Image (tube, grey):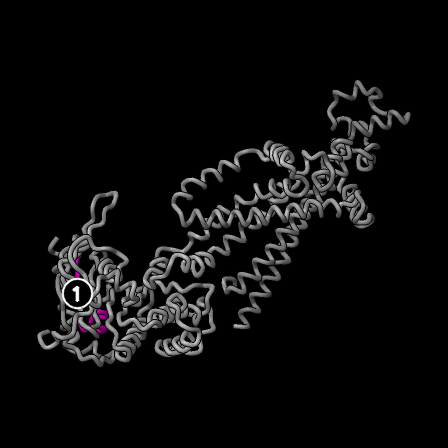
């Protein structure tokens, strides 16, 4: 038994190393591609700067350069390539510029500063967590209702599906305006938008999970003359756990998107969404990209935490080995 | 039968009929089924698939509702008997909850029926011993072999002391060697607990080896073609299967099955 487990452990770790290599390779390819893409994306801006600085550029006139392909310009002005990775306001910032910005705005700024990404991430995270809690709670309640009531199954499910076909970007401003008019602002409207996106995967996953016990399992409970609530607590709910965690992982990522979208129409006060918006107002592409990366890192951390929770819970329940 | 007239039959079916309505038209699953099972009987239902043996067992368990005739279990209707927890049911698959240990799985019916914690412990210990699984209470189902899992599911059906045990091809998915062993154990268990057992199978040797009464059924419509009261003694070592009596009973079962087929 132990030997088997050990062998499995070793196999897992060698598989783990392979996985790390695979991820690193992909990341490496993406970074290379990104640097390559930055050159043509930024070449026109760089050449304009050079022209203003009085340096020789080929062709020398901006009008002539306007209609030329970026690749041609790169070939004609190879000395400008270095500068495409160092601009203040590039169209596409190079990876190291985004990394520097991330470092400066997280480690080198006080977290109370309005320029700290950690401060903004926290604003978004708190709305995400609140929205996720509301969305998960609502999703589970709806799923329980749908599984136990035919009326709810027929009435709620279509609406839940329709709700997700409306673009959230169109709905978010209306939610904020309506709530503002009844005196609710701040974290609540953002959390509601976030809940609006996250309840859906939880409903779908939980309905599937609560219905996962087969006919035999249900017959068995019938032979015990078990009540519906006993069937729920002893069979349906535990059987739905693997489905719930899968949904939660999708749900939390959706929650984060919802919170960010909810920050856009409020006029960019605080939060990662605000950073995105402020960045686009002022052409601060480096700031936009760093906010994007902060959001991605945050999402990865949240999903990762849920994955750890999943493993712990399922292992405790005896459902994972 | 006359001498036992004071004791009521445990299961009694009179002209039982069951028709399923399906999209392809009605299916006559049971037709004019008459059967009396007395206390302590070991009754096997044997026949080809579609003969209604499982359906009949499910009727006794009130998992299906007959569309005609009368069926009593312990003198009550089948559904009353179910609500009184008159029987334990063993399915073809063990159906243990993967999130519960073996002991916790056996406690499932006890929890539902409201037994006290100490009584639950006591009964788990007793039935684990009955099915020869002492010491496995703390294991999870995936840590046990298929045969052990099925024994645990029998223990679960025994835990709440119903006098009837209904088993629907419980060993159908197991290999022959494990099956022989479990059959032997089942007989020992039956002798110790004096339960009335209804057992669905499609194996002739299994039916003859285990039963005091063999019900031969045939399909389209599902009906009983023969009821054989076994002349074999209650005490049955495995090698009883080589005796002329055993072979004779098996022969009669085979004849009954063949007769059901040529009727078509």
Report the residue at 31% width, 71% height from top. Answer: B179
Q: Give the x, y percent position of residue A25.
A: 67, 48
CA neighbours of label 1 inside 10 A, class few (<14), some (14 to 19), many (20+): many
Q: Is residue B21 above or below residue A7?
A: above
Q: Is residue B212 magenta?
A: yes
Q: Is residue B164 left or right of residue A250?
A: left
Based on the displayed image, in which of its 4 quarters is residue B199 positioned?
A: bottom left
What is the total number of numbered labels drawn onto the structure image? 1
Q: Is residue A220 magenta?
A: no
Q: Is residue B164 above or below residue A31?
A: below
Report the residue at 23% width, 46% height from top. Answer: B21
Q: Which residue is mark 1?
A: B12
Note whether residue B204 is visible. no
Q: Extreme left residue here?
A: B2
**Residue nearest the viewer, comparing A108 with A128:** A128
Q: Label 1's element?
A: strand
Q: Is residue A3 left or right of residue B37?
A: right
Q: Give the x, y percent position of residue B33.
A: 15, 59
Report the residue at 56% width, 50% height from top. Answer: A248
Q: Extreme right residue here?
A: A54
**Residue nearest the viewer, comparing A194 with A245:** A194
Q: Give the x, y percent position of residue B230.
A: 15, 74
Name the chain under label 1. B
Span of residues in magenta: B205-218
Question: The N terminus of chain B appears in which quarter of the rendering?
Answer: bottom left
**Residue nearest the viewer, comparing B80 with A218:** B80
Note whether residue A96 is visible. yes
Q: Extreme top residue here?
A: A63
Q: Is residue B178 left or right of residue A250?
A: left
């Amino acid at each position: 038994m132990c030997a088997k487990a050990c062998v499995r452990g070793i196999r897992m770790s060698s598989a783990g190393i392979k996985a790390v290599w695979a991820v690193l390779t992909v990341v490496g390819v993406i970074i290379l591609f990104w640097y390559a893409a930055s050159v043509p994306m930024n070449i026109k801006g760089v050449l304009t700067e050079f022209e203003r600085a009085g340096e020789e550029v080929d062709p020398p006139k901006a009008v002539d350069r306007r209609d030329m392909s970026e690749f041609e310009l790169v070939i004609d002005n190879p000395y400008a390539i270095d500068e495409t990775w160092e601009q203040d306001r590039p169209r596409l910032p190079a990876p190291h510029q985004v990394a520097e910005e991330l470092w400066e705005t997280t480690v080198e700024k006080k977290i109370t500063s309005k320029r700290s990404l950690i401060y903004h991430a926290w604003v978004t995270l708190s709305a995400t967590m609140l929205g996720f809690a509301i969305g998960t709670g609502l999703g589970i309640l709806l799923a329980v209702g749908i599984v136990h009531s035919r009326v709810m199954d027929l009435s709620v499910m279509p609406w839940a599906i329709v709700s997700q076909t409306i673009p959230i970007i169109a709905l978010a401003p209306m939610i904020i305006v309506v709530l503002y008019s009844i005196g609710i602002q701040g974290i609540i409207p953002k959390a509601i938008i976030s809940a609006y996106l996250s309840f859906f995967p939880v409903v779908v996953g939980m309905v599937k999970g609560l219905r996962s016990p087969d006919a035999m399992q249900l017959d068995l409970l019938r032979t015990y003359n078990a009540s519906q609530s006993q069937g729920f607590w002893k069979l349906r709910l535990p059987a739905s756990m693997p489905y719930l965690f899968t949904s939660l992982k999708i749900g939390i990522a959706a929650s984060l998107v919802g919170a960010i979208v909810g920050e856009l129409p409020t006029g960019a006060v605080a939060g990662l969404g605000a950073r995105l918006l402020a960045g686009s107002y002022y052409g601060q592409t480096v700031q936009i990209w760093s906010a994007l990366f902060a959001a991605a890192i945050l999402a990865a951390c949240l999903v990762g935490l849920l994955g750890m929770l999943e493993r712990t819970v399922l292992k405790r329940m005896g459902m994972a080995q | 039968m006359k001498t036992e007239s004071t004791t009521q039959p445990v299961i009694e079916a009179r002209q039982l009929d069951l028709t399923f309505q399906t999209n392809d038209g009605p299916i006559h699953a049971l037709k004019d089924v008459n059967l009396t099972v007395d206390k302590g009987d070991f009754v096997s239902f044997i026949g080809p698939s579609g003969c209604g043996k499982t359906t009949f067992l499910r009727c006794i368990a009130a998992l299906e509702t007959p569309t005609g005739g009368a069926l009593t279990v312990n003198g009550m209707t089948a559904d009353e008997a179910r609500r009184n927890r008159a029987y334990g049911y063993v399915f073809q698959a063990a159906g243990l909850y993967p999130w519960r240990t073996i002991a916790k799985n056996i406690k499932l019916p006890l929890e539902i029926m409201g037994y006290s914690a100490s009584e639950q412990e006591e009964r788990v210990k007793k039935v684990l011993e009955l099915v020869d699984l002492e010491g496995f209470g703390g294991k999870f189902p995936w840590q046990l072999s298929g045969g052990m899992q099925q024994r645990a599911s029998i223990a679960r059906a025994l835990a709440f002391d119903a006098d009837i045990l209904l088993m629907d091809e419980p060993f159908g998915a197991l290999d022959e060697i494990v099956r022989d062993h479990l059959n032997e154990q089942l007989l020992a268990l039956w002798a110790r607990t004096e339960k009335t057992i209804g057992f669905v199978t499609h194996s002739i040797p299994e039916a003859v080896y285990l039963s005091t009464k063999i019900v031969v059924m045939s399909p389209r419509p599902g009906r009983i073609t023969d009821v054989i009261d076994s002349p074999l003694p209650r005490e049955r070592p495995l090698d009883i299967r080589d005796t002329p009596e055993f072979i004779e009973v098996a022969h009669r079962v085979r004849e009954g099955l063949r007769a059901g087929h040529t009727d078509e």
